[in-house]
Amino acid sequence: QLVESGGGLVQEGGSLRLSCTASEQSFDNAVMGWFRQEPGKEREFLAAAAWTVSTTWYADSVKGRFTVSTDNAKSQVYLEMTSLKPEDTAVYYCAAARRYSPHSTFYNYWGQGTQVTVSS
């Protein structure tokens, strides 16, 4: 089970940190991804991190503004978002996959999502 938290309303230029807690040991060797989805649009890959190696991946659209990290002891993965823009408004999801991919179809487990709203 994956549970996201940390979403909310923030002003343009502000920051938020999203957290995702993985409650099962079966995620220990997974790659954890962050996606977002706006109404009527496909899920967009943002970033991913591997639990077992210090490797991260980013979409070009968020590189330099978003940072993904893991805390293996807490089984949590984070998405630190800075310089937020109104177009970052979406539901944000964490997901787990056996290996890295920017495609949502490779991710077998998904959290329920957390809403991020950026006001101008």
Image: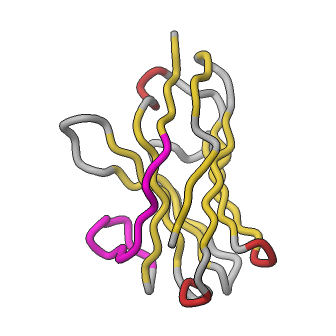
Residue 83 in the image: state x and y as whole percent: 63, 28
Q: Is residue 22 left or right of residue 93?
A: right
Image side of residue 97 versus residue 83, left or right: left
Q: Nearer the viewer, residue 58 or 76?
A: 76
Residue 33: x and y in percent read 49, 65
Q: Residue furthest left?
A: 40
Residue 21 placement: quadrant: bottom right
Numbered-mark total: 0
* Residue 105 lies in the magenta-colored region: yes
> Is 96 drawn above or below residue 48 in the view shown?
below
Magenta residues span: 100-114
In the displayed orientation, state which residue is furthest to the top: 120
Q: Is residue 66 magenta?
A: no
Q: Main secondary structure of the magenta part?
A: loop
Residue at 61% over, 60% down: 20
Q: Residue furthest right?
A: 73
Q: Residue 48: image x %, image y %?
A: 53, 65
Q: Nearer the viewer, residue 40 or 68?
A: 40
Q: Residue at x 61, y 22 (%)?
A: 10
